[in-house]
Amino acid sequence: MNEIKLEYDTHVSVVHYESLDSRSFKSFSKPEWSKLVNKLSVPIEANYKYARGVAVYGDIKDGANDHGETIKKHRNDVNVIYRDVIVLDYDEINDLKQLHEAISSVLSSVAWYWHTSFSHTTEQARIRLYIPLNERISADDYRKYTKVLANKIGHKVDEGSYQPSRCFALPVIQKGHIFIKRVNDCP
């Protein structure tokens, strides 16, 4: 697959989990935006949506269980240290071209990347939109920013996208399904 080359780049943070379990921390990294985009651009083929695990784009602090034992990067809203990528899921798309045009227009001067998600079909489009930020934001600001951006884009977004600790499946496609991606390279 061809590498996506970006002129503009920034560092982002990724907390990778094995599964949806909030205690399944696997790794933490701070890749360049371009490296993340390229990783997200190559899905694996599997029948299980979470075959590659899930990620939160930012950082999460450790938590503790009821016995006082440390849970590394325990994912919940209280433990969000910061977010540095906004992620919006669009699951009820009537017209993918129209949504892409809205994203391109509203976000014309900022970097973004979207790809189709696991349940995407020609009949029922679904995408995940990523917008890297030039600064880290708090959990409360993440809620506000996601709502403002979703409102400006003007298409129905999965409201789970507003949750600061929400994890997102890394790209997986089902056999025979297509994978579409688009990128906007801006500072």
Image (cartoon, helix red, strand yellow):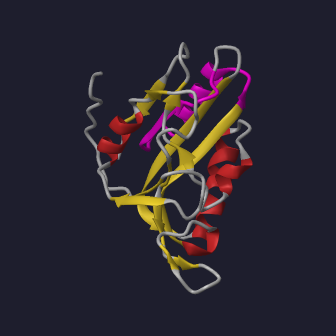
Q: Quadrant of residue 47?
A: top right
In-front residue for pair 181/106: 181
Farthest residue in the bottom direction?
68
The image shows residue 118 at horizontal and vertical percentages of 59, 30
Q: Quadrant of residue 88?
A: top right
Q: How many marks?
A: 0
Magenta stretch holds residue 152: no
Specify start and end residues of the magenta stretch as a single range: 92-120
Magenta stretch holds residue 93: yes
The image shows residue 82 at horizontal and vertical percentages of 49, 68
At a point 44% along the width and 42% down the height, the residue shown is 109
In-front residue for pair 150/157: 157
The image shows residue 87 at horizontal and vertical percentages of 55, 48
In-image side of 97 versus 13 (left or right):
right
Q: In this rendering, is residue 75 above or below 46?
A: below
Q: In this rendering, is residue 157 above or below 81?
A: above
At a point 65% along the width and 62% down the height, the residue shown is 144
In-image side of 27 versus 92 (left or right):
left
Q: In this rendering, is residue 49 above or below 83?
A: above
In-image side of 34 versus 176 (left or right):
left
Examine the rendering and report whether any part of residue 121 can be seen: yes
Examine the rendering and report whether any part of residue 106 can be seen: no
* Quarter containing the N terminus: top left
The image shows residue 179 at horizontal and vertical percentages of 50, 21
In-image side of 112 versus 48 (left or right):
left
At a point 49% along the width and 46% down the height, the residue shown is 53
At a point 29% along the width and 50% down the height, the residue shown is 32
